[in-house]
Image (spheres, helix red, strand yellow):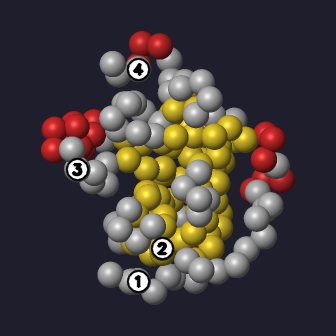
Amino acid sequence: MAIQAKPLSQIKHQRVFVYRNLHQDCWSVKSKETGRVVAHADRVELSDVEFKVSETGRQRVLREQSKNVHAGLVGTLENFHSRGEEYPSATYINGADADSKVSITYNPYKYAHFVVRETEAPVSHAESAVLQADKKVFATNPTYLEEGLIAS
């Protein structure tokens, strides 16, 4: 179902939950306040980010071998670019460039948490994150989970 994206001015600086929409090949931006999807986007920029995985939802994926919405990023919406909208590829929030960001990934079949792509170190939070059209997620200053908190 296509939705009409809310203007950025109406939702900027709101807390949102962002997840990969596999059916529409984009990011879905869901308002934490209303619980409704307010935009489908090719690119999303967040600050004060928390990486969330529902273990119950992840277990359902493992059991049924069928993906469902159970993981995403909660953060303050700074910017988004609607599907098909052109945007400069080198824009980053807080003046950061690509070299200061780490690539983050999540695969429910391999990990119980979001992890740094290169090291597989689990992360819980980040100062900011950029979610790109090519499905890549980059985070600035991630907070790593402590050893005792890592689910096996």
Residue at mark 3 to residue at mark 4: CA–CA distance:
24 Å
Q: Secondary structure at mark 1?
A: loop
Residue at mark 1 to residue at mark 3: CA–CA distance:
25 Å
**Which residue occupies the extreme bottom position in the image?**
4
The residue beneath circle 4 is: 150
Q: Secondary structure at mark 3?
A: loop
The residue beneath circle 1 is: 3
Q: Residue at x 58, y 34 (%)?
A: 117
Q: In the rendered view of the protein, which quadrant contains the N terminus?
A: bottom left
- Mark 1 or mark 4, which has the lower sequence index? 1
x and y percentages locating residue 39 in the rendered image: 48, 75
Query: Disc number at residue 40?
Result: 2
Query: Disc number at residue 66?
Result: 3
Question: Marks 1 and 2: CB-CB under 8 Å?
Answer: yes
Residue at mark 2 to residue at mark 3: CA–CA distance:
22 Å
Q: Is residue 95 above or below residue 126?
A: below
- Residue type at tag 1: Ile
x and y percentages locating residue 86 in the rendered image: 70, 78
x and y percentages locating residue 59 in the rendered image: 22, 36
- Mark 2 or mark 4, which has the lower sequence index? 2
Question: Marks 1 and 3: CB-CB under 8 Å?
Answer: no
Q: Residue at x 28, y 51 (%)?
A: 67
- Asked whether 126 or 136 is in front, the reply is 136
**Which residue occupies the extreme top position in the image?**
148
- Mark 2 or mark 3, which has the lower sequence index? 2
Residue at mark 1 to residue at mark 4: CA–CA distance:
37 Å
Asked if one can make out residue 21 in the rendered structure from this viewpoint, the answer is yes
- Residue type at tag 2: His
Query: Disc number at residue 147?
Result: none
- Residue type at tag 4: Ile
- The part of the image, by quadrant, that contains residue 142 is top right
x and y percentages locating residue 74 in the rendered image: 48, 51
